[in-house]
Image (tube, coloured by chain):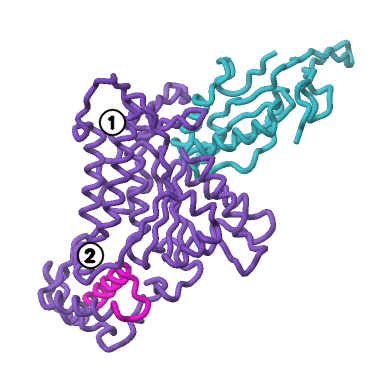
Chain colours: A purple, B cyan
Amino acid sequence: MTGPAPAANGFAMPRPGGGGAAGNPAGGAAGNTAGNSGPDRGEVRAGGAGPAGGAGPAGGGQPLAADAVVELSSQQQALRIAAILSQLDREFVGLAPVKERVREIAALLQVDRLRGRYGLSCARPNLHMCFTGSPGTGKTTLALYMGRLLAELGYLRKGQLVSVTRDDLVGQYVGHTAPKTKEVLKRAMGGVLLIDEAYYLYRPDNERDYGQEAIEILLQFMEAHRDDLVVILAGYANRMEVFFRSNPGMGSRIAHHIDFPDFSLDELMQIADLMLAQQEYRLSPEARDAFREYIGLRMGQPRYANARSIRNAIERLRLRQAGRLVAAGGRVGRDDVIEISAADVRGSRVFSGGAGVASGAGRSGPGPREPVPGSGFGSGS
Amino acid sequence: MRITQGTFSYLPDLTTDEIRAQVQYAIDQGWAVAVEFTDDPHPRNVLWEMWGLPMFEISDASAAMHEITACQQAWPDHYIKVSAYDATLGRQTTALSFIVNRPGHEPGFRLDRQEVADRQIRYSLHAYATDRPAGERYASSNGSP
């Protein structure tokens, strides 16, 4: 209960900005949080809260005189943004072009806010985005960060992430789609709506498909509620291209097209280290070499999904480690339960050319060439 | 005669920003916000028409504001109220409800006296607005969609 302190009767007028301190509902999923609700959160709230809607980001901060000079990096808000960006650097391995783009967007929004304080025009930028890339390259995770970042910058009031696929938007019978889509959009308002594999919304082979209706409502909301909602479409690059070609209205309303490159072997190793460190496991030196070899093999096999494959591989490593320890019996120390041995890694079917269909591979998502409709909910991208 | 039902009804009409702030407060408390409308101003008329379903999963007031605006556009001369339902076990009741839209002219009520047995008198309130059929009760409301 961090909302505005209610008066005795419980129905006090909330102070503007008081509600913002209620915490970020999306923040929990990504591990630690980088100070997402400062005491003066109210100052960075979206200026577009007025009835007219299009007030832009001018609401935050005191107005500045024309000859005033501001130290950009010393503003408290800038410090918090820097904290989020450095977290992005820490927790996202590789993805240099993506980070560069996020940095640019953050800078633009920061400067826009300053322009607003000088009384200059600062039309709210179009923030709808499109993330393309192979599975497991961090699209959903980045969307989560995007929500937090935009909330920090005051462009979103909450910054929560609502992740949906075609099934959540498109209805099954006439008149079912519109309420369903609107329901989802309302849930996402104040935050980010991530539509995974957005191209499934449009089915060119069936002209009476309800997906078109969902797209129309989506477009309408993207235009009318630009202040309240950021829509991010995610999916494979080539299919997304086809989708935009057949829905030019959608393509033109999305300003930021960000392409996620595949990870290199070294980056995957870094990711593995990061994941293991988070779960408080350790690879023995031999196991490390073996795991490197494992990743090299796994990359060439079907249903390879970048970081997600690594996550699943680590799950299986844990299984095999536990199995080994229990089977061996006897006395076990702290180091034994932390360390993963080479045998645990070598036990994988990948080494015997098992096409990576080891246990749990079903969760590793569709491969780049063979996407499965609707399988991406929650775990997509 | 100005109807005073629900919270804030003795205050001047809330502005859009004030409504938004109230709705955000309700959402932050975990209450489900619903929009209701009616053209029968009788104080005992508590079950108004629902405008869509209650909004259970929203986290920002702008979603509710979208529905309130839509309802105001559809029924500009009706009473519209926002209610917030607290589903917490043990409370399970409306926690907050306030009027966000009212007709331009509210004709008010008259007191009806009915003589019954033994020269007793029964009193009832009669809203002038309800003399006309539902949907055409307020002079300026000519268009119900």
Q: Nearer the viewer, residue A184 or A62?
A: A62
Vertical relation: A316 (above or below) A351: above
| Amino acid type assigned to the residue bearing label 2 in the image | Ile
Secondary structure mostly seen in magenta is helix
Magenta highlight range: A299-322
Q: Quarter of the image for the C terminus of chain A: give it.
A: bottom left
Residue at the far bottom: name it: A352
| Callout 2: chain | A
A22 and A81: which one is in front? A81
Label 2 vs 1, first from the N-terminus: 1
Residue at 12 percent across and 67 percent down: it is A334
Q: Position of residue A351 (x, y in %)?
A: 25, 85
Residue picked out by circle 1: A39
In the rendered image, residue A13, in percent from the top left (x then y), is placed at 45, 23
Q: Quadrant of residue A263?
A: bottom left
Q: Is B56 drawn above or below residue A351 in the view shown?
A: above
Element type where label 2 sits in the image: helix
| Coordinates of residue A48 in the picture (x, y in percent) | 44, 32
Quarter that holds the N terminus of chain A: top left
